[in-house]
Amino acid sequence: MRHTLLLLVIAFTADAQQHDLLLKGGHVIDPKNNIDAVMDVAVRGGRISAVAANIDPTTARRTIDVAGLYVTPGLVDIHVHTYFTPNVKGLSNETFRAGIATISNSVMDAIKSVMTCEPDYLVMGVSGITFLGGVKGADAFVRQVEEVAGVSISIGSHAAAAALRAYGGVSRLAILSPYWPVMNEEVKRYFTEAGFQVVRDHAMQVASWVGIAAVAPAQCREALARLDGDDVDAILQVGTNLSMLRVAAAAELWLGKPVIAINAATYWHALRSNDMREPIAGFGRLLEEF
């Protein structure tokens, strides 16, 4: 009888420990599930098995007190610069084009450097160089990167073209950039070769590389209003350092047509290329609907 009782106790204990790990008392931030509170998080088999205000520690094989710490799903930094570009002030057509050449000449070394962290996929956070040489130039750039890196890549030019096609019914474009006219010509060439008609464009001619990030949302809104018209099916913003995600998303509502920020297009392309299709709200129809 004593042996039988011992077996029953062991079986009961094993069954009670339904979690491998319990993180106790941490501040859980989980935007997807609308959680921003002190909660317990349990893990079993490498997956989250429970999230609750108070999980019994006896149900876990191991408990860690994480009071005072944040507990959140994995964070990914999707924008890392690993090349050097002098912050030339007083940019012009000539110096802007020279700066693009500097970036182009250093990007392969940057890719070799970033591959030391062994990523499964690359997302190109610089769009200017991906327009050089039209569609064939972009194709050649992708081949070169993938040969060096050994993994696939999403680039701004191809991602933007794919995004425009995803909306459907888009053939006439207006293009907004922080660039100078010499670079806008490269952008227009690419989209013309990709089968779109560029009705008009606006180069904001920002005075320095760093200054692109300081362009105010109001300036972007004014530029979008000038570019819009009944002869335009969609507006595309290029230049990844220009902050346009939320402005573009809002503009889609008041203009009633696709307004695509290139950062949204590039990220969307990378997600879909890796079969990640969960809608992301707040950054325009592209990430939410397509």
Image (cartoon, rainbow, N blue to C red):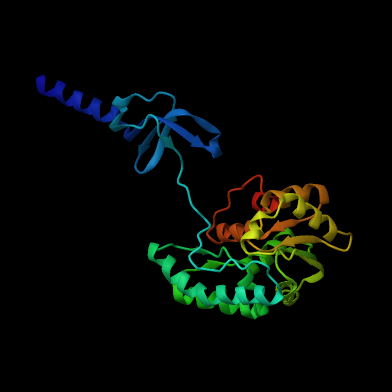
Residue 136 occupies which quadrant of the picture?
A: bottom right
Height in image: 74 above or below 122?
Answer: above
Spot occupied by residue 144 in the image (x, y as percentages of width and height) = 51, 78
Residue 16 occupies which quadrant of the picture?
A: top left
Badge count: 0
Viewer-closest of 89 and 274: 89
Residue depicted at x 51% and y 74% = 106
Residue 137 visible in the shown view: yes
In the rendered structure, the answer to whether residue 47 lies left or right of residue 146 reads left
Residue placed furthest toward the front:
90
Viewer-closest of 199 and 88: 88
Viewer-closest of 36 and 239: 239
Residue placed furthest toward the top:
1
Residue depicted at x 56% and y 60% = 270
Residue depicted at x 53% and y 77% = 105
Residue placed furthest toward the right:
230
Spot occupied by residue 55 in the image (x, y as percentages of width and height) = 38, 25
Height in image: 82 above or below 1?
Answer: below
Residue 171 visible in the shown view: no
Spot occupied by residue 187 in the image (x, y as percentages of width and height) = 71, 72
In the rendered structure, the answer to whether residue 202 lies left or right of residue 140 reads right
**Quarter occupied by the N terminus:** top left
In the rendered structure, the answer to whether residue 19 lies left or right of residue 14 reads right
Residue depicted at x 55% and y 39% = 32
**Quarter occupied by the C terminus:** bottom right
Spot occupied by residue 169 in the image (x, y as percentages of width and height) = 79, 62
